[in-house]
RNA sequence: GGGAGGUUAGCUCAGUGGUAGAGCACCUGCCUUACACGCAGGGUGUCGUGGGUUCAAGCCCCUCACCUCCCACCA
């Protein structure tokens, strides 16, 4: 018999099993020789959302990785050929910033190194930190196939990126052009709409007077314009009013003078102008405001760039302003306006302003030459795939968000003025002609010259991630991997990257492979702290998965995260709950220790004759069958919370609190019960296997100790079959009543002990008699059951009973119970505290209230006529039981409260 | 301005039209020979508000309130 360590210590085995699993290649996954053959395993595939290559796993990763691993392990145990493909993302901006920051410590900038040297340095950085992600996933117990690890900048994926780019270009979906883009002066690059975060800002609304140019004889006139950004006035090329605005109709077609600058600009009519806002007159600055850009386009207005990429005023803003930063320029301009008497009003104003999500600076709308991808038809395909069920979102409530975003999608700015990333496969000759090609050689051929310079921009990181589900399997080559594993079954990720990543993968996948890259997407909530507050470095409430694993063990962390994943909810992470789940591990450990200490000579039975077993054994097996089915159902629906709850309850409450206690007398020498050891082992084996996907380390450690486990799988629980959800073990209705009677009698005994301040050492006789005339038969039946050897032995063992006696209890025995027309009274063999009359009175009040409720219901003709017969019958029986209970309570209370 | 989600025990959350549940916390008693990371016992909850449907509503429908988040070019 294996001697088990008494102390439960996850650290003592987690690392060992992780190394063992990796060394034995349990999670390495290949394409079968003949995938189409009958009986060949079906593939199951999940692509990891690739974390930043030099990053650190945060709680969100831990949550998503736990769920991905849970599903992968579950499917693997079900016999599916299960691939969880790991990898990392080059994370253009994030990684480049890290290296730049590192460089800054040496007092250098990336420009001091030059592009080539800088990139060498980033690669070195990547090599240094790359192993971190794998190490952390290993700690968590992730069953990835590391032989297939991919990186978004590795050779195969780069090939896929160039291929996709060139094809989209040739199809006319990608084009290069000058356009007003979101410019981040913090990152020194253009960013996409998605990377702009709107924040409410307390600002000022400045009202500025513009002189109207007048012909001779006309009276001087000025109009007042409201703006939040006075400095852009220097780039104004028009004023606009609403075409139906009576106040200004006479001005349309005239010209105004830009204050300070002195330029003459037209006044146009445009229906986008809101008459009610401000003064109803808008200044139009096409090169520094998106709305103005559109207005300018409608009216053929030119633009003037007065702010540059560094956020400084350009020469075009005038000699007084050129070179100043925006804020200084604003101050100067306001001074000049005041001096000229043209600043007529200032008021506080709260509005939404775009900020660069990553660097936090205010976004500057700026004219710039960039690459854009027109995704409109791809978006339509992604909409259709969702609409017809080829792509399912879980929870489904995300559907509307999906539809709204895709239906209103705009061109995607895919170029970035960074160095770290996929350099755009476009080359220019000396004359500035552009050649898009898969390789430099192809470009040379197209251009007819070797004098080519490659476009210095790189692609948005999300462009390569969008190809992830198929680029990782060898696309654009038609590999066997791609044919077999693609499309994947499930994607698990956070809702925060639904547009950034999921929608783009769907669009690219549908476009290049004709199939949705995943059948279902499970979107998780956000991991928050115990108080429900979003974790952030500045708040100092960030929990590190690695610390938690060290403190509680990976299994407790996994169980906690999985059990909190309820649809549409965020995940509040409370260390106390984590500790509670560690205690669950301790419980499993000790239950196993107990079973192993009692089953000398037995092994896990290969088959079991359910019909021959005694009630407790039959009951726990029926519960096992139920929980196997419910866990299966829950996992199919991504209800990890329900799966965990059912497993927890089954193991702790059903198996430990009830079955193991009931098994104890059955293990005594001479017990008439059969196969108790076998059932203990069988249920423990199945329970560990059911728990394995969520608690892989603990279950492997314990399962390996079970005698006979090697007949289920010679090596590991990871590859042992998941317990069948269709187990045929069912109790008959009569047995169901028996087990609940047994449990109620035990509970009655425990209640009496607690109420009357007795210890478990006090023994009791149980008197049984009919509670009302005609119930004699029930008493006989009850006696037969309770006095059978198995049951009586059980009652003696776990309820502290001596005898079960038919007949009235001795006089003075006060604490009676009524169950199904039968009165049961416990008489203890030691002196007991008196019955708490106040408590009984409360109980009686409650019963009285209940009686009048049920009676009223039964007296209502609409109820008896319209409710189903079973419900009415239930109410009648309920009433009868309540009335009996009332008799019982009155019987106990009255002799005491009465005169004698 | 649209849209989504939430509102149930002290806390965090499940809940399938038929008398409201779990875990944690808390209180009481127990070192009952697997486990004190444990065992047993302990809950009178305006199920956010107001209406409606129904014999019957935490659940279905409508209204409103509050909280979270997403989307959105009124300068």
Image (cartoon, coloured by chain):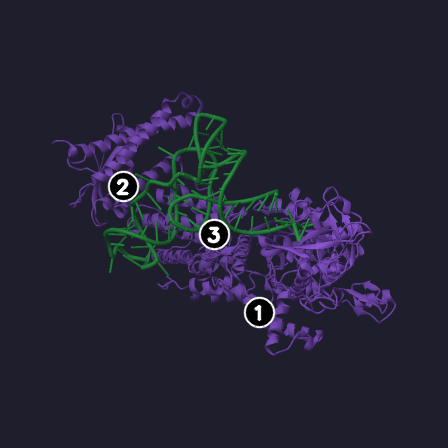
Chain colours: A purple, B green
In the rendering, which numbered label is found on residue A748? Answer: 2
Badge 2 or badge 3: first in the primary sequence: 3
Tell me the crowding category of disc 3: few under 14, some 14 to 19, or many 20 or more residues within 10 angstroms, Cα based.
many
Residues indicated by labels 3 and 1 sit on the same polypeptide chain? yes
Give the side of residue B17 with respect to residue A24, left or right: left
SS class, disc 3: loop
Residue A411: tell me if it is visible: no
Tell me the crowding category of disc 1: few under 14, some 14 to 19, or many 20 or more residues within 10 angstroms, Cα based.
few
Figure quadrant of residue A599: bottom left
SS class, disc 1: helix
Residue at image location 19% in from the left, 37% down from the top? A814
SS class, disc 2: helix
Figure quadrant of residue A580: bottom left
Task: From the image, state whether disc 2 or disc 1 is nearer to you.
Answer: 1
Tell me the crowding category of disc 2: few under 14, some 14 to 19, or many 20 or more residues within 10 angstroms, Cα based.
some
Give percent across and percent down for residue A879.
Answer: 32, 28
Mark 2, chain letter?
A
Residue position for label 1: A131
Give percent across and percent down for residue A239.
Answer: 74, 52
Residue A587: tell me if it is visible: yes
Give the side of residue A263 with respect to residue A830, left or right: right
């Amino acid at each position: 018999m294996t001697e088990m360590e008494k102390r439960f210590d996850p650290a003592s085995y987690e690392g060992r099993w992780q190394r063992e699993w990796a060394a034995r290649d349990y999670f390495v996954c290949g394409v079968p020789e003949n995938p189409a053959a009958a009986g060949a395993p079906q593939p199951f595939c999940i692509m990891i959302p690739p974390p930043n290559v030099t990053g650190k796993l945060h709680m969100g990763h831990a949550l998503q990785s736990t769920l991905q691993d849970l599903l992968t392990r579950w499917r693997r145990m079900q016999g599916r050929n299960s691939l969880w493909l790991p990898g990392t993302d080059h994370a253009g901006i994030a990684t480049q910033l890290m290296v730049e920051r590192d460089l800054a410590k040496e007092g250098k900038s990336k420009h001091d190194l030059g592009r080539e040297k800088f990139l060498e340095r980033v690669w070195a950085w990547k090599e240094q930190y790359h192993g971190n992600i794998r190490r952390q996933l290993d700690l968590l117990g992730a069953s990835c196939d590391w032989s297939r690890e991919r990186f978004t900048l590795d050779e195969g994926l780069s090939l896929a990126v160039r291929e996709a780019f060139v094809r989209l270009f040739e199809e006319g979906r990608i084009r290069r052009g000058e356009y007003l883009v979101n410019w981040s002066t913090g990152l020194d690059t253009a960013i996409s709409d998605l990377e702009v975060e709107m924040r409410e800002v307390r600002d000022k609304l400045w009202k500025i007077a513009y002189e109207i140019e007048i012909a001779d004889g006309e009276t001087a006139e000025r109009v007042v314009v409201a703006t939040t950004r006075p400095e852009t006035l220097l780039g104004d090329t028009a004023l606009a009013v609403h075409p139906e605005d009576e106040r200004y109709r006479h001005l349309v077609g005239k010209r105004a003078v830009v204050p300070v600058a002195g330029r003459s600009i037209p006044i146009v009519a445009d229906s986008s102008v809101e008459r009610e806002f401000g003064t109803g007159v808008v200044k139009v600055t096409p090169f520094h405001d998106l709305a103005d850009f559109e207005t300018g386009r409608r009216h053929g207005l030119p633009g003037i760039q007065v702010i540059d990429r560094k956020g400084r005023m350009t020469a075009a803003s005038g000699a007084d302003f050129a070179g100043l930063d925006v804020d200084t320029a604003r101050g100067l301009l306001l001074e000049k306006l005041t001096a000229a008497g043209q600043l007529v009003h200032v008021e506080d104003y709260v509005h939404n302003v775009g900020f660069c999500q990553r660097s936090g600076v205010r976004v500057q709308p700026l004219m710039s030459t960039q690459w854009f991808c027109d995704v409109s038809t791809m978006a339509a395909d992604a909409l259709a795939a969702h609409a017809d069920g080829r792509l399912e979102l879980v929870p489904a409530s995300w559907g509307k968000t999906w539809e709204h975003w895709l239906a209103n999608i705009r061109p995607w700015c895919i170029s970035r003025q960074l160095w770290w990333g996929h350099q755009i496969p476009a080359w220019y000759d000396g004359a500035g002609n552009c050649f898009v090609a898969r390789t430099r050689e192809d470009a040379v051929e197209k251009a007819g010259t070797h004098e080519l310079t490659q476009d210095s921009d790189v692609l948005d990181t999300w462009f390569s991630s969008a190809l992830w589900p198929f680029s990782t399997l060898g696309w654009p080559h038609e590999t066997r991997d791609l044919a077999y594993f693609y499309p994947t079954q499930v994607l698990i990720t956070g809702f925060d990257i639904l547009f950034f990543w999921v929608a783009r993968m769907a669009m690219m996948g549908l476009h290049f492979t004709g199939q949705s890259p995943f059948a279902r997407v499970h979107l998780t909530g956000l991991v928050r702290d115990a108080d429900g507050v979003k974790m952030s470095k500045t708040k100092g409430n960030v929990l590190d998965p690695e610390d938690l694993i060290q403190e509680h063990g990976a299994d407790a962390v996994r169980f906690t995260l999985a059990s909190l994943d309820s649809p549409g909810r965020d995940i509040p992470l409370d260390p106390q709950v984590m500790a509670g789940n560690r205690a669950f591990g301790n419980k499993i450990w000790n239950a196993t220790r107990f079973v192993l200490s009692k089953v000398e000579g037995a092994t896990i039975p290969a088959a079991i004759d359910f019909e021959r077993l005694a009630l407790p054994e039959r009951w726990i097996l029926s519960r096992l069958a139920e929980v196997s089915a419910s866990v299966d159902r829950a996992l199919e629906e991504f209800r990890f919370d329900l799966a965990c709850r059912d497993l927890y309850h089954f193991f702790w409450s059903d198996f430990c609190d009830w079955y193991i206690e009931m098994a104890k007398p059955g293990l005594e020498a001479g017990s008439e019960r059969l196969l108790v050891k076998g059932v203990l082992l069988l249920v423990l084996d199945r329970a560990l296997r059911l728990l394995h996907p969520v608690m892989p380390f603990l279950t492997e450690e314990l399962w390996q100790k079970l005698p006979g486990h090697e007949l289920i799988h010679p090596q590991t629980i990871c590859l042992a079959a998941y317990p069948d959800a269709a187990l045929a073990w069912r109790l008959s209705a009569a047995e169901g009543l028996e087990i609940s009677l047994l449990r109620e009698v035990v509970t009655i005994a425990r209640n009496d002990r607690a109420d009357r301040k007795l210890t478990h050492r006090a023994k009791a006789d149980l008197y049984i008699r009919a509670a009302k005339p005609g119930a004699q038969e029930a008493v006989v039946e009850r006696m037969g059951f309770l006095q059978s050897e198995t049951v009586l032995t059980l009652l003696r063992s776990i309820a502290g009973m001596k005898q079960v006696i038919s007949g009235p209890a001795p006089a003075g025995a006060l604490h009676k119970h009524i169950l199904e027309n039968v009165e049961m009274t416990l008489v203890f063999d030691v002196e007991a505290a008196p019955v708490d009359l106040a408590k009984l009175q409360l109980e009686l009040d409650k019963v009285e209230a209940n009686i009048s409720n049920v009676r009223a219901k039964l007296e209502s003709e609409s109820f008896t006529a319209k409710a189903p017969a079973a419900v009415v019958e239930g109410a009648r029986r309920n009433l009868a039981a309540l009335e009996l209970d009332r008799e019982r309570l009155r019987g106990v209370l009255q002799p005491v409260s009465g005169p004698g």
